[in-house]
């Protein structure tokens, strides 16, 4: 070994394999300082690329190339793709800030248990960029040896030095925050976790002092034992037992070209690798199923400055040229084709660098595979990783006899130790790995409703009431075929909103959402089910529903005029109806049934005839709710936090082309009853005393309303004023095409949830609402979204487009079997939710089993 190489190994300099692991001096927000240099560490935001259009993907790839070639050129960079188990208990702590009504602790606890059952990992993306060498490296290294011998430890880092480095780090962040990665400084707590996690110790992380971790606190992060073996490492816990087994794989060969989307996305696809765990002696093969490997990545790279890149390419070209000439001078007289091809390629590449601005990168990719189960389990995971990349013609091998060097190399603050397993290529080969790609959708906080089913795992949050708080649109649409889970998803959103203290009114045209009331009462929420039957006479009386008598003084005559037979309207029945309403208001006890009785006793013959006709209609199931005489104790709708379901399965609304005089009695009563609900919804949304309360108006089977002029106008009005009035509109429809034509609603859509649709026209309409290209690929995806590979229906699988216009595939998740049974909308289940059971208080047994 040469003297210079020995000195380099001793000092930890250069790219040689020797030298000690990095010696950390300080951690701060966005900074890791070792004895030899300082690095900026940034968290990167994952992009939603699974459903991204080709044009958007190309644009993001170009931006990534520019960030690599312009911002990071000349810097030593270190990318880490990491996984951590989802801490389900954290959701219970969040719930105190999310929910406030009912037994929200039990509601959130049910979700926590479900998250524990799923056991989903969370991906983290961190990027380290070397900022500067700390002065006097050799002197510091020698001084460190003296300090270690004397037991005096590492000297503190000055505040001045930290401030100067922080300024450099933030300057770098400002240049990268506009990149597709949206970089931010990594919190000091994240950096402490990044270093300590490799030790697999359970000791708590040190708390920063004055924003930094220094001195003796640093030592607590690296108290671990790593035992290297030829093909793996054993991490020894505090008790002396093996806590984990780890293997570091290298990628010595890539094919000349890789497709994207496809095998070229070799970093994004880490989350897609699964394996079959080995079956032990006592194992049951029937219980074996695929599990995620969750391999991690450590990639060190350096984008070559233009001059260095040209020099390196020219050297390679000249070498190939000399080999060609030498071969031509031999007896054979013919150079090999590889030599000729290399010379031509280097010449073309030199021209591309000079003329087209192509950037080159030296990169050293490593894949880290870890198991906390057994060495056999680790080897099964390694085999799965090797097989996964073999399908893309990427060679992946275990770093034989170099596990220690590779382990040191992947530590933050270290360096390239095994330089001969690296590659020089254009930056697109690195950016096209889409290390920041995957799936992401939903709100940043709020209730958890399901999980991603795209290329990266993760939970999905959706708060239908969040639009008003954010000053955004407040309408959410659920669109798709019947029986795919739309109504159940709407029910979950309404329950989550009610636990947030919202007044949730559900207009149930199909009559199958009575289970929402059962579920709400089981978890301590105020809830009531109202049906269009004589038992609920007077429950939709506008005198009761509307704030004050002035609004009712206008709405009640309009409602009764709609319900009156056309021949009486033609004779002027509106006049005696209005007179009767005014008289009842003056009496001081206004009610619609009193208006009908007043009409029956009027001196005016037309008034008496109108009153008799309305009295008979009030005995029907559709007429009783808005103009029938209520029985004592009859349930009424009240604008307070909770869930209120109004079932109107017998409605028969006329289409917009049918004139009012042609409506039959069933249609007249249907429109009059709907008039109550629409007037109640508009008035409740606009009440000044309720402006501070969250409000949700949910309309399942909204195509019943969109077919009428009044219904479409009502939806447009609520959608447009929802932000100002704090009212969220939740729509559920099988007709995406009809909804897409209501401009007032489409303009106010905050989120769209798309389920399976089968006709091309409906699929194209859904594509437009989801912000996806209407092409054969997207239509096929919408066609398949509701089916399992076996052909069975996949309930609750959908595509969500959120407020940021990100779209991803999502599985809606009901946290317990008991809750799923309560929300079942099948005919048998809907029949079980009768008014008698729905209005009864939840039994103790129901509350416990839920």
Image: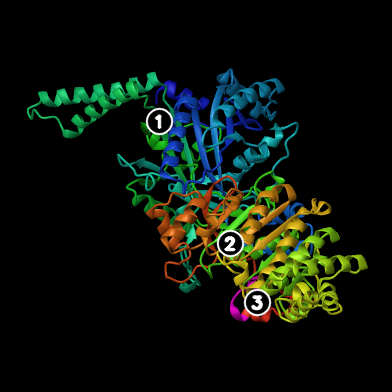
Q: Is residue 446 left or right of residue 409?
A: right
Of the numbered discs 2 and 1, the one sitting upstream in the chain is: 1
Q: Secondary structure at mark 1?
A: strand
Q: Position of residue 138 (x, y in %)?
A: 55, 20
Q: Residue furthest left?
A: 331
Disc nearest the viewer among 2 and 1:
2
Could you tell me what secondary structure mostly forms the magenta stretch? helix
Q: CA distance from mark 2 to mark 1?
A: 60 Å
Of the numbered discs 1 and 3, the one sitting upstream in the chain is: 1
Task: Locate residue 6: give its quadrant.
Answer: top left
Label 3: which residue?
Answer: 665
Q: Is residue 723 left or right of residue 74?
A: right
Q: CA distance from mark 2 to mark 3?
A: 21 Å
Task: Please say whether residue 650 is visible from this viewpoint.
Answer: no
Q: Is residue 20 magenta?
A: no
Magenta range is 817-828
Please tell me which residue lies in front, 574 or 770.
574
């Amino acid at each position: 070994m040469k003297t210079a190489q020995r000195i380099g190994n001793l000092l930890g300099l250069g790219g040689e394999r020797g030298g000690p692991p990095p010696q950390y001096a300080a951690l701060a927000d966005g900074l890791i300082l070792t004895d030899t240099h300082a690095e900026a560490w940034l968290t990167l935001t994952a992009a939603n690329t699974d459903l991204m259009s080709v044009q958007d993907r190309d644009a993001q790839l170009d931006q990534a190339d520019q960030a690599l070639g312009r911002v990071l050129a000349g810097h030593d960079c270190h990318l880490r793709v990491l996984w951590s188990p989802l801490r389900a208990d954290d959701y219970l702590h969040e719930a105190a800030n999310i929910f406030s009504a009912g037994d929200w602790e039990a509601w959130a606890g049910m979700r926590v248990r479900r998250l524990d059952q799923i056991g989903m990992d969370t991906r983290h993306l961190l990027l380290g960029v070397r900022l500067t060498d700390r002065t006097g490296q050799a002197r510091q290294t020698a001084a460190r040896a003296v300090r270690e011998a004397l037991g005096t430890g590492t000297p503190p880092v000055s505040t001045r030095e930290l401030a100067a480095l922080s300024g450099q780090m933030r300057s770098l962040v400002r240049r990268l925050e506009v990149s597709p990665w949206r970089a931010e400084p990594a919190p000091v707590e994240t950096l402490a976790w990044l270093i300590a996690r490799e030790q697999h110790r359970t000791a708590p992380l040190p708390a920063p002092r004055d924003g930094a971790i220094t001195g003796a606190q640093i030592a607590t992060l690296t108290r671990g034992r790593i035992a290297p073996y030829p093909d793996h490492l054993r991490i020894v816990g505090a008790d002396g037992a093996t806590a984990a087994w780890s293997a570091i794989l290298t990628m010595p060969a890539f094919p000349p070209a890789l497709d994207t989307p496809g095998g070229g996305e070799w970093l994004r696809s880490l989350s897609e690798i699964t394996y079959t765990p080995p079956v032990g002696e006592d194992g049951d093969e029937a219980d074996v199923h695929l599990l995620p490997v969750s391999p991690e990545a450590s990639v060190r790279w350096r984008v070559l400055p233009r001059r260095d890149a040209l020099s390196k390419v020219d050297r390679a070209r000249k070498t190939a040229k000399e080999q060609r000439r030498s071969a031509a001078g031999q007896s054979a007289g013919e150079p090999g084709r590889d030599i000729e091809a290399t010379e031509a390629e280097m010449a073309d590449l030199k021209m591309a660098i000079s003329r087209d601005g192509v950037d080159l990168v030296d990169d050293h990719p490593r894949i880290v595979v870890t198991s906390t189960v057994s060495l056999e389990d680790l080897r099964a995971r390694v085999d799965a990783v090797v097989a996964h990349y073999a399908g893309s013609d990427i060679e992946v091998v275990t770093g034989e006899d170099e596990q220690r060097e590779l382990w040191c190399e992947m530590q933050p603050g270290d360096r390239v130790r095994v330089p001969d397993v690296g590659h020089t290529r254009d930056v697109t080969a690195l950016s096209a790995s889409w290390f920041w790609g995957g799936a992401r959708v939903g709100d940043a906080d709020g209730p958890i409703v399901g999980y991603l089913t795209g290329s990266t795992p993760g939970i999905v949050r959706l708060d239908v009431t969040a639009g008003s708080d954010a000053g955004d649109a407040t309408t959410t649409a659920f669109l798709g075929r019947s029986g795919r889970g739309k109504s159940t998803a709407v029910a979950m959103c309404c329950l989550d909103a009610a636990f947030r203290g919202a007044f949730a009114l559900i207009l149930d045209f199909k009559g199958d959402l009575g289970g929402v009331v059962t579920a709400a009462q089981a978890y301590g929420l105020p809830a009531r089910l109202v049906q269009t039957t004589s038992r609920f006479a007077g429950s939709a009386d506008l005198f009761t529903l509307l704030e004050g008598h002035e609004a009712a003084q206008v709405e009640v005559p309009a409602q009764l005029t709609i319900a009156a037979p056309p021949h009486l309207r033609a004779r002027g029945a509106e006049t005696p109806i209005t007179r009767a309403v005014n008289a009842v208001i003056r009496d001081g006890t206004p009610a619609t049934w009193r208006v009908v009785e007043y009409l029956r006793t009027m001196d005016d013959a037309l008034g008496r005839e109108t009153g008799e006709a309305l009295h008979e209609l009030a005995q029907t199931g559709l007429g009783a709710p808005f103009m029938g005489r209520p029985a004592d104790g009859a349930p009424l709708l009240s604008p307070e936090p909770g869930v209120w379901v109004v079932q109107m399965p017998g409605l028969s609304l006329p289409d917009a082309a049918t004139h009012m005089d042609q409506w039959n009695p069933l249609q007249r009563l249907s429109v009059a009853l709907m008039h109550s609900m629409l007037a109640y919804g508009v008035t409740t949304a606009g009440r000044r005393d309720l402006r501070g309360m969250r409000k949700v108006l949910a309309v399942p089977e909204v195509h019943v309303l969109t077919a009428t002029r009044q219904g479409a106008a009502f939806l447009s009005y609520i959608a447009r004023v929802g932000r100002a009035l704090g009212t969220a509109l939740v729509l559920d429809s099988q007709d995406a095409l009809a909804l897409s034509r209501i401009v007032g609603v489409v303009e106010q859509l905050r989120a769209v949830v798309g389920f399976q649709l089968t006709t091309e026209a409906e699929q194209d309409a859904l594509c437009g609402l989801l912000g996806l290209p209407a092409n054969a690929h997207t239509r096929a995806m919408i066609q398949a979204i509701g089916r399992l590979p076996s052909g069975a229906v996949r309930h609750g699988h959908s595509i969500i487009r959120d407020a940021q216009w990100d779209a991803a595939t999502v599985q809606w998740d009901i946290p317990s079997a008991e809750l799923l049974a309560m929300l079942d909308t099948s005919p048998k289940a809907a029949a079980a939710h009768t008014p008698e059971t729905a209005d009864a208080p939840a039994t103790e047994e129901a509350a416990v089993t839920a």
